[in-house]
């Protein structure tokens, strides 16, 4: 066994921060497979003064414990297996990634993969080699005293988490800009600002900022992930795929990245490859809503509708099911599989027939698909039906008027004159989880995924 090495955040090219004293550790969760190491840790954590120390032997129990208590210190051993470690570290993240708990990571040997995964999941301290009482005390002191962030950073992250829950994206961007101005060496804050730009659909700002972050920290995987997300939102799927595939080779067990890769492949009409990514994500996190949705849409596009319905049966309400059908239909129509897309819209209507607002949105998107198929009269009927079912859906009435005018002139927006259809606006089925900012209304409103 090699000599012990202590790797802290500064050696992972992250921020140097001032010590803080307001982060006491009241509870610790240990997920360590090596019996002797686990025993030493149990003893020393209690001796350090942590009132409650709980060793979890199974991954499922560890994840359940972490989800119940978002403040517990996590002590985790790389020798528990890379896949298990990735799952546990994923569960240890807060709902907005800015409120991550303290994490103490142990490994026999230091490797690029260990560093990359620790870095990606905001690990506070890595110890490699033999472990002693003095090592544990030293590392706990550092975790308590430095806690990964300055008081300003911690307070800003708390405020940002609350603002995201409220959906106030502009204020999130403002808060994160201010923090980055005041702490220019804070990588974690820099990445969160990139995420905030992307989340607010400020793609030009996001790309410029993430490029600067990637130049300073070329190995940061979350920065790469966000660069890929920007490319995907611009429809640059090949570019997004290349970026994420590179990151995936370094850290292959990231559920969020696997889902993103699956969605990119779906948009590239590489459905079977997309299916493999969603299956891999579900293997790591069987409860991932995004991975279930992606897999179900793959099944629909492969003609396996019954299998998709079985999976979707686990979802909360019919509107969510219709949303998944709607998304698959949009993908089919993009690939000019118009009959398949129309069949999926019809199926979506069957799931939400009791909800006029949701049915109206499906009819709206069906109308757009029919325009692209070159069936303007049938499309007009769909828009009329959408406007009738939900008079508040102004986009349906808007498209109805545009299409009526086009038919009188002998032309049709979309298929016959695609250059006259500029930016697009999404019209979602109720229950969809996406919440994109509104955009200016073009002459003819289309759906996007």
Image: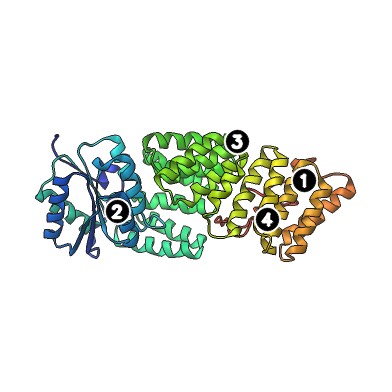
| Horizontal side of residue 220 vs 424, given as left or right | left
Mark 4 or mark 1: name the one nearer the start of the chain: 4
Q: Return the disc, 3 or 1, that comes first in the chain's sequence.
A: 3
User: N-terminal of the two: label 3 or label 4?
Assistant: 3
Q: CA distance from mark 2 to mark 4?
A: 41 Å
Residue 195 percent coordinates (x, y):
46, 51
Comparing 121 with 277, the one in front is: 277
Residue at left offset 69%, top offset 44%: 341
Q: Is residue 164 left or right of 301 when viewed as pictured?
A: left
Work out whether mark 1 precedes mark 2 in sequence or the reverse, and give the earlier one: 2
- Of residues 187 and 333, which is closer to you in this image? 333
Assess disc 2: are there few (<14), some (14-19) or many (≥20) residues with their C-alpha within 10 Å of its C-alpha: many
Q: Are marks 4 and 1 in contact (CB under 8 Å)?
A: no
Q: Marks 3/1: CA distance?
A: 21 Å
Q: Which quadrant is home to the N terminus?
A: top left
Residue picked out by circle 2: 62
Task: Determine contact: label 3, label 1, CB under 8 Å.
Answer: no
Structural distance between the alpha carbons of marks 4 and 1: 22 Å
Q: Which residue is mark 3?
A: 269
Rendered image: mark on residue 350: 4
342 displayed left or right of 296: right
Foreground disc of the pair 2, 4 = 4
Q: Is residue 122 visible?
A: no
Mark 1 — residue?
371
Marks 3 and 4, Cα distance to the nearest angstrom? 26 Å
């Amino acid at each position: 066994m090699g000599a012990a090495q202590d790797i802290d955040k500064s050696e992972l090219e992250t921020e140097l921060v001032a010590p803080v004293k307001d982060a006491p550790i009241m509870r610790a969760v240990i997920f360590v497979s090596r019996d002797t190491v686990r025993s030493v840790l149990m003893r020393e954590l209690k001796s350090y003064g942590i009132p409650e120390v709980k060793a979890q032997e199974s991954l499922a129990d560890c994840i359940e414990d972490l989800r119940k208590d978002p403040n517990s210190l996590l002590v985790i051993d790389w020798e528990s297996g890379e896949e298990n470690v990735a799952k546990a570290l994923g569960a240890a993240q807060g709902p907005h990634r800015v409120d991550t708990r303290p994490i103490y990571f142990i490994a026999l040997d230091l490797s690029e993969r260990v560093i990359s995964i620790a870095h990606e999941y905001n690990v506070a301290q890595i110890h490699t080699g033999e472990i002693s009482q003095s090592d544990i005390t030293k590392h706990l002191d550092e975790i308590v005293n430095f806690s990964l962030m300055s008081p300003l950073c911690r307070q800003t992250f708390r405020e940002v988490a609350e603002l995201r829950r409220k959906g106030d994206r502009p204020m999130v961007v403002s808060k994160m800009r201010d923090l980055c101005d005041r702490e220019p060496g804070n990588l974690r804050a820099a990445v969160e600002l990139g995420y905030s730009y992307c989340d607010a659909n400020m793609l030009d700002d996001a790309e410029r900022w993430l490029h600067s972050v990637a130049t300073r920290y070329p190995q940061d995987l979350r920065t790469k992930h966000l660069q890929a997300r920007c490319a995907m939102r611009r429809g640059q799927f090949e570019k997004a795929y290349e970026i994420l595939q590179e990151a995936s080779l370094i850290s292959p067990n990231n559920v969020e990245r696997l889902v993103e890769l699956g969605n990119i492949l779906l948009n590239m009409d590489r459905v079977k490859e997309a299916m493999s990514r969603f299956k891999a994500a579900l293997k790591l996190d069987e409860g991932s809503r995004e991975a279930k949705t992606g897999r179900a849409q793959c099944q629909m596009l492969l003609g396996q509708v019954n299998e998709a319905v079985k999976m979707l049966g686990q979802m909360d309400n019919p509107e969510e099911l219709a949303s998944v059908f709607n998304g698959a239909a949009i993908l089919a129509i993009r690939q000019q599989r118009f009959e398949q897309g129309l069949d999926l819209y019809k199926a979506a209507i069957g799931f939400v027939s009791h909800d006029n607002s949701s049915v109206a949105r499906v009819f709206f998107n069906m109308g757009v698909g029919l325009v692209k198929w070159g069936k303007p009269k049938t499309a007009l009927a769909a828009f009329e039906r959408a406007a009738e079912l939900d008079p508040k859906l102004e986009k349906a009435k808007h498209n109805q008027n545009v299409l009526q005018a086009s038919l009188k002139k002998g032309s049709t927006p979309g298929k016959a004159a695609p250059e006259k259809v500029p930016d697009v606006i999404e019209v979602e089925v109720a229950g969809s989880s996406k919440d994109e900012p509104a955009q200016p209304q073009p002459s003819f409103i289309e759906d996007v995924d």
